[in-house]
Image (cartoon, rainbow, N blue to C red):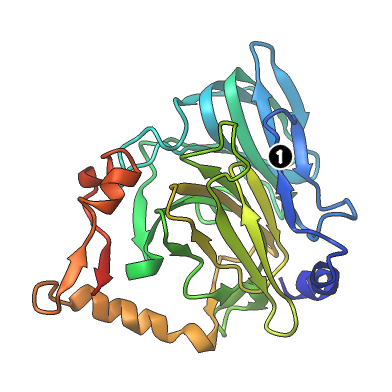
Amino acid sequence: MERTLKKYAPHIEKNELSPLFFDDGKQNGLIVDPKKENVPLDFIGFGMLRLSAEYQTLETMENEMVIVPQEGIFEMEINGSRFRGERLGGPFTVELGRTNASALYVPRYSQLKIRGEGEVAFFTAEAYGDKPPFYISSHEVRMVSRGEWLWRRDVVNLINPKNASTNLIVGETYNPPGLWSGTPPHTHDKDDSQGGESDHEEIYYFRFSIAQKGGSNYAPYAVQLLMDGVSLKKAFILEDRSIFAIPGGIHPIVVSPFTEVLYLWGMAGYGNDLLVKDVPEFAHLKNFEEILRTLDPKKLKIFCLKNIFYAFLVKKRFPRRKRGFTFLC
């Protein structure tokens, strides 16, 4: 978001403010609160709920919420309507190319009661109208491929103004080992539908398939970049349960070769449909994607590593994927 970026970029550049936060696995409630001075956002918040057999009660007030289960079994009630679901074992338990994600939309001025086992993540932002509660199950969502070659990833769209919300846009991205997301680098910083861009802040919540278990100071990692095209050029090391607040600018990610990463993302702004604008210097990558889709792997000597490298890294789950990753020799 342009105005948010202008407000906070100088402070991030000078290390006076950090967009990187961490979920310690114990916090219950809002973790990234846009009303706090240490958060470089003005619109969207993020938090976690740790579930138990007893109901927790939340009041949304003027905000809407989107809840995305991370692991476990849950039961929720919104203004008398009941919803049940599960995400057993977390996001990496299903075979690659599939998803077990689901989401619940909670309208403004609602009372939410939730209980169960495990944990759920949530986004919150100002609502721009009234809509009914909405639940999308894992059987209703689909994972789609985005990008090609070194920036190929899988995306699941969960909640947006077209199906449920008035402002929040929420989904998940699966990032294979060693590859990029947020590529080609793009922005959603201006309310300019004619120019192909919308105005949204964003938050990422990262989960790693291989997380540090102790005994070493070097955990599997990913790297998050944040640049405003002027003077802000920062890189941040991500670990399992890292949370990253994106006021604006370009924000690509690269994952280390040691782990799969799945990140939950949420956006909020002025209630527009999401429109992303590729940075001109990198827009040609879209043309490169079209070329890669038409290449003959045999004639152009493209070597596919899917049954060697990735099968080893992700415990032999990769061969079940319908689509391999190809690398130019």
Q: Is residue 42 visible?
A: no
Q: Is residue 328 above or below residue 164?
A: below
* Quarter-of-image position of residue 109: top right
Q: Residue 76's spot in the image, x, y percent?
A: 60, 23
Q: Residue at point 58% right, 78% down? A: 193
| Left or right of 92 on screen, residue 232 | right
Q: Quadrant of the N terminus?
A: bottom right
* Quarter-of-image position of residue 138: top left
| Left or right of 168 on screen, residue 7 | right
Q: Residue at point 35% right, 56% down? A: 144
* Nearest the eye: 156 or 274: 156
Q: Residue 192's spot in the image, x, y percent?
A: 63, 80
User: Which secondary structure, mark 1?
Assistant: strand
Q: Residue at point 47% right, 39% down? A: 210
Q: Residue furthest top?
A: 53
Q: Is residue 261 above or below residue 304?
A: above
Within 10 Å of disc 1 (Cα), the crowding (few <14, some 14-19, many 20+) is many
Q: Residue at point 19% right, 77% down? A: 294
Tell me the residue that label 1 is attached to: 47
| Left or right of 174 on screen, residue 125 | right
* Quarter-of-image position of residue 122: top right
Q: Residue 52's spot in the image, x, y percent?
A: 65, 15
